[in-house]
Image: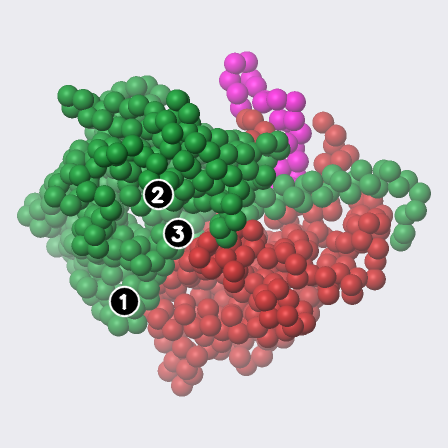
Amino acid sequence: MLIQGRQSISHFWLKVFLTLLCSCVAGIGFVSGSAKAAEDGEFSIIASVQNQTLVSGSTSRAPLEGVAIKVTKVDGTLIGEAITGADGLGKVPVPSRDDYVIEIDISTLPDGLVLIDATKQKVFINQDLFTTNNKRVTFFTGQGAEAGASTIERILQRLSDGIRLGLIIAMCAVGLSLVFGTTGLTNFAHGEMVTFGGMIAFFLNVTLEIPILISGPVVIVLGGLFGLAFNWAIFARLNKRGIGLISQLVVTVGLSIMLRNIYLFKFGGRTKQLSSYSKQVNLELGPIGITPRDLTTAILGIIILVSTALFLQRSRLGKAIRAVSDNVQLASATGIDTRKVIKIVWFAGGALAATGGIFRGLDEQVSFSMGSDLIFLMFAAITLGGLGSAFGALIGGIFIGIFVEMSSLYFPSELKAAPALFILIVVLIVRPQGILGKSQRVG
Amino acid sequence: MDWNQIIQNTIRACVGVDAIYFAVAALGLNIQFGYTGLVNFGQAAFMACGSYGLGMTAQYFGIGLWWGIPIGILFVIILALIVGVPTLRLRADYLAIVTIATAEIVRLFVRSVKLRNIFGGTEGISNFSREYRELNPFEPGKTYGFAPFQFSGYTLITVLVGWTLVAIFSFLVWQLMRSPWGRVIKGIREDEDAVRSLGKNVYAYKMQSLVIGGIIGMFAGMILALDRGSVQPDNYSRDVTFYILTALVLGGLAKVAGSVVGAMLFWVIFVFSDNVLRELTRNGPLRFGDFTVIQSTQVGAVNYMFVGLGLMLLMTYRPQGLFGNRTEMALDGR
């Protein structure tokens, strides 16, 4: 069995095999593996310190000179220090692609200036963030009324962030819950509908340079059509073929994998920013700092959710949707066209998910996995609120958003999702039907 | 295009380590999903139990590698209780939601910076396999075998150990499913209430199935860890579970041979598609006129896109896979 001749050839094959193996592993490990292909060479972390001032309503930025920054390893070992130059940049070479912590020395800031986000004095740099050899970290400073936030202020700030996250989760989760209620399908590809909204918004807003206020409604309609397409192309047909709900659930998993990789294929593995309203300074509302953009999206979010609730509660169609969601057979016996209602639910769910995608894209950034990162919070929300109940999804979503953000006061933010799992498990043990669900559904 | 090379790589993929750990994990998932009807979307977390059990024994507890097995089993039982206790009394999709969430949280925990001194953060654990390497009778640098089945001594030991485990677990699952226990399990999949009316404790049987499937999955994680010589958190992302599920459905649910052949076939198709696409894009992007079809950085995405599409088509048009029996695949658990 032992080959002793042809050494060089077998070595060649070995190399090919190992390379393949490695590429497969890299691919399996993380889908975006291909996007962060290793570039060897010198690595460095560049800090950019920018001072923001509000001049007649618009933000202007100026580089800050003479600010000390420090890069350490995660365990605290010092790697290097730098002082920013006239361009506001300070460069610290680092030995390799690794996890680092960059810290800005706030005592070296000019008098009266503070970091706009006081929590960003230390920034953790994950090695995955090195998309090129240089990782740039930007610190924004501004005129500070008070330095350092008290506990109550931090709680209020988190609450405000939590409400905004909660609104997005609620918006995305309503469709998930209604689709479940009307068809019994647990749609694992719902997150991809959210990403769809973000992607189309990015395409219209950044590539075609249409302002988000004009492109937003287009995205929402397209999102609704996307949801309709899900039903038309896949799930209506599966139902017609008499394929069971668990099999359909596995189909949604396949759909989720496929769509996510299509997004990765077209969009790439990096996160990108929408161009509208990306540069704004915080408005100080009492102790809470919020950008005008975030305030607007929050108010819009509330308006959208309240009108969704009113629509479901008051309108004929809304009542029909709730009836089908309650009991399909009974609703159909009373003369409701259940198929039409299901189509409307898919459209509305898709449109709301796309809206959530736009808001999330404005709030954070657009990436190929932005929706699938949220899906788990959405499931926690609809389980808490009661699977199949639209109002439950609204309440659950807002609660989960606030709970998750608040818990990051005491919990490392990289484990943000863990408290949601905790809620999920407690709810399932204590009251598996959720707040507004019906107990006959769970067993 | 070097077809000779592509075909050799493809053939080798069906006996390689990837196929082995997929086969073992699929055998475990088959007990849960195929035979019992439990929708476990967190098999990757059970694999992580094995890998981290193994890694932590040598790295932190300073005890022999063999202790990794009981410690891994302990992790599996804890994990199975966390996901099983709240959900096994409820409808099937609750388990799906909780397992997928738990698996993701497990991954976030083991890669977190705060717990770096326990789990090693994003780099994971890498100094644990020396004991295993010393057991290796082959020379690591040498190449053994005949084309296309050539492996370095370093890999060969894992290949042999792995296929032995696949054989043992296949036999075990086969015997288990012929036993009275297996008949109850299959009965639960078909009609839970009927089994309950016979006086069986359905909840306990489901939990046993979850744990046994998890323990087999744990061995898959161990094989992966020993072959790579390291434990890395991102090897246990949620998509890994879905790829294993795809392999399982491809081979056929509720069939022992289905898990093994499905895993082999999955990797044969995957490696073939990967190789062909990489060859096509090696000298710059593939173009038709001015239209860029695919670049080399997009190969991974295209491969996984096919996996997702494949899973959808299989579930729709051939849910019994290659070996399955259509009547056994009436997964309608509610």
* Residue B162 picture quarter: bottom right
- Pinpoint residue B126: horizontal percent, then vertical percent: 63, 56
* Residue A289 picture quarter: top left
Is A145 or A400 nearer to us in this picture?
Answer: A145
Which callout, 1 or 3, points to the residue nearer the camera?
Answer: 3
* Chain for numbered disc 2: A
Q: Amino acid at mark 3?
A: Glu
Q: Residues within 10 Å of mark 3 (few under 14, many from 20)?
A: some
Which callout, 2 or 3, points to the residue nearer the camera?
Answer: 2
Q: Residues within 10 Å of mark 2 (few under 14, many from 20)?
A: some
- Which residue corresponds to the image point at 47% horizontal and 59% vertical from the top-left? B115
Q: Work out whether A41 lies above or below A344.
A: above
Residue B97 shown in magenta: no
Residue position for label 3: A414
- Pinpoint residue B87: horizontal percent, then vertical percent: 36, 69
Chain identifier of the red chain: B
Q: Amino acid at mark 2?
A: Gln
* Chain for numbered disc 3: A
Q: Earlier in the sequence, mark 1 or mark 2?
A: 2
In the rendering, which numbered label is found on residue A427? 1
Residue B291 shown in magenta: yes
Is A288 or A210 nearer to us in this picture?
Answer: A288
Chain identifier of the green chain: A
In the rendering, which numbered label is found on residue A121? 2
- Which residue corresponds to the image point at 21% horizontal and 29% vertical from the top-left? A217
- Pinpoint residue B21: horizontal percent, then vertical percent: 63, 57
Q: Residues within 10 Å of mark 1 (few under 14, many from 20)?
A: many
Q: Residue furthest top?
A: B289
